[in-house]
Image (cartoon, rainbow, N blue to C red):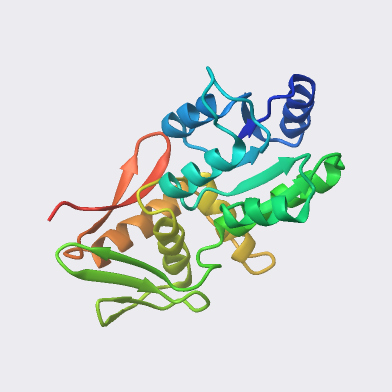
Amino acid sequence: MAHLLLVEDDELLRDGLCAQLRLAGHSVDAVDDGVQAKALLESTRLDGVVLDLGLPPVQGVAMDGIMVLRWIRQRLPHLPVLVLTARDDIDDRVAGLNAGADDYLTKPFDMAELLARLAAMLRRSRMPAFDGTLQADAPPAHRLRLDPQLPMGWLDEDAMELTHREWSLLGLLLKHLGQVVGREDVLAVWQTQAPEGGVVGGSNALEVYVHRLRRKLQGSGLNIRNVRGLGYMLELQAP
């Protein structure tokens, strides 16, 4: 399942949420202020964040949930964030969504709804291209583009020959450009896209597809790097 960060200053609620999220199969790191949240986000690979907006100042410095959310969108634009807060005014909801929240749930809440919303948010984040054409510009002037619905791609203006799984894998890596994508995340996406009863394959099959994509990206300024023990990262190569 997912590795989550829970940012909540209410100790009782934080402990209860951690227990429920772990029972649901997730790995959870929990902190009670924005400074600790930023430190973990900078040092740890995470799949999603559950974020309270009403965070306390740290040593007299304001660092509420909206500030943390805006920081996440600047530094980790593709990381899914579920806002969890007692602020139920429509202006607060709009502010949270405009700051970059992927979903918004007000307190008090039903745990089943939180888990369902979280699962849906994580599922959307793993789709290869749910938010339109994916694109990356690489030095010296190469451009990689992927169609959001069909297994089609282009390197500059040249069409790429991609199988469905190559397109799915490359889309996932491109969506998380510069971030590590775990092997289990790729296999999970392949499982959702496989026909009923279809065979997904394991790590050995994944290595084959990564090798194929590396060959197709040669000379583009993009490279798929194997991050030992974690997964793969699509990165821009120095010109």
- Residue 6, given in percent of the width and then of the height, sits at 64, 32
157 in relation to 13, above or below = below
In the rendered image, the quadrant that contains the N terminus is top right
40 in relation to 46, above or below = above
Residue at 56% across / 56% down in the picture? 126
Comparing 226 with 119, the one in front is: 119
Residue 47 seen in this snapshot: no
Residue 13 seen in this snapshot: yes
Comparing 65 with 228, the one in front is: 65
Q: Is residue 139 left or right of residue 98?
A: left
- Residue 171, given in percent of the width and then of the height, sits at 44, 64
56 in relation to 142, above or below = above
On the image, which quarter does residue 228 sit in? top left
Comparing 20 with 202, the one in front is: 20
Image label count? 0
- Residue 229, given in percent of the width and then of the height, sits at 41, 34
In the rendered image, the quadrant that contains the C terminus is bottom left
Q: Is residue 2 left or right of residue 106?
A: left
Residue at 52% across / 38% down in the picture? 46
Q: Residue furthest front?
A: 60
Residue at 27% across / 59% down in the picture? 214
- Residue 117, given in percent of the width and then of the height, sits at 74, 51
